[in-house]
């Protein structure tokens, strides 16, 4: 998911540099959403892994 966020960010920056600010901003907005979703999923899995590790021991 971080790969897609990076792709959207790069495309958004390139579009913004070429003068397509509206669509470039939309791409950057999508990149932000994907980034925060990826971080949230990472944190959820981290907490689940820590909890599962304690229950097994």
Image (cartoon, rainbow, N blue to C red):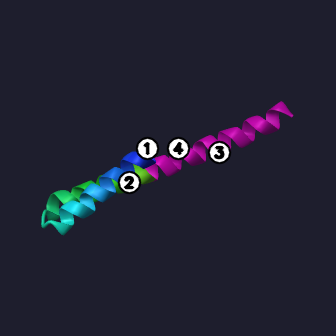
Disc 3 is placed on an element classified as: helix
Q: Does the residue at mark 3 contact the one at mark 1 (Cβ under 8 Å)?
A: no
Task: Decide which of tag 3 and tag 2 comes sooner along the chain.
Answer: 2
Residue 54 highlighted magenta (yes or no) = yes
Label annotation for residue 16: none
Disc 1 is placed on an element classified as: loop
Task: Decide which of tag 4 and tag 2 comes sooner along the chain.
Answer: 2
CA gap, disc 4 and disc 1: 10 Å
Quadrant of image for the N terminus:
top left
CA gap, disc 1 and disc 2: 9 Å
Task: Decide which of tag 4 and tag 3 comes sooner along the chain.
Answer: 4
Residue furthest left as drawn: 19
Residue at 73 percent of width and 42 percent of height: 50
Q: Which residue is mark 2?
A: 6
Q: Position of residue 10 (x, y in %)?
A: 31, 58
Q: Which residue is mark 3?
A: 46
CA gap, disc 3 and disc 2: 22 Å
Crowding at mark 3 (Cα within 10 Å: few <14, some 14-19, many 20+): few
Task: Decide which of tag 1 and tag 2 comes sooner along the chain.
Answer: 1
Q: Quadrant of residue 31?
A: bottom left
| Above or below, comparing residue 32 to residue 41 in the picture | below
User: Magenta residues?
Assistant: 36-57
Label annotation for residue 41: 4
Front: mark 4 or 2: 2
Q: Which residue is mark 1?
A: 1
């Amino acid at each position: 998911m971080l790969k897609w966020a990076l792709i959207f960010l790069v495309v958004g920056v390139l579009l913004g540099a070429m003068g397509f600010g509206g669509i470039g901003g939309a791409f950057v907005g999508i990149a932000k959403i994907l980034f925060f979703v990826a971080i949230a999923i990472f944190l959820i899995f981290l907490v689940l892994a820590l909890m599962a590790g304690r229950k097994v021991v």
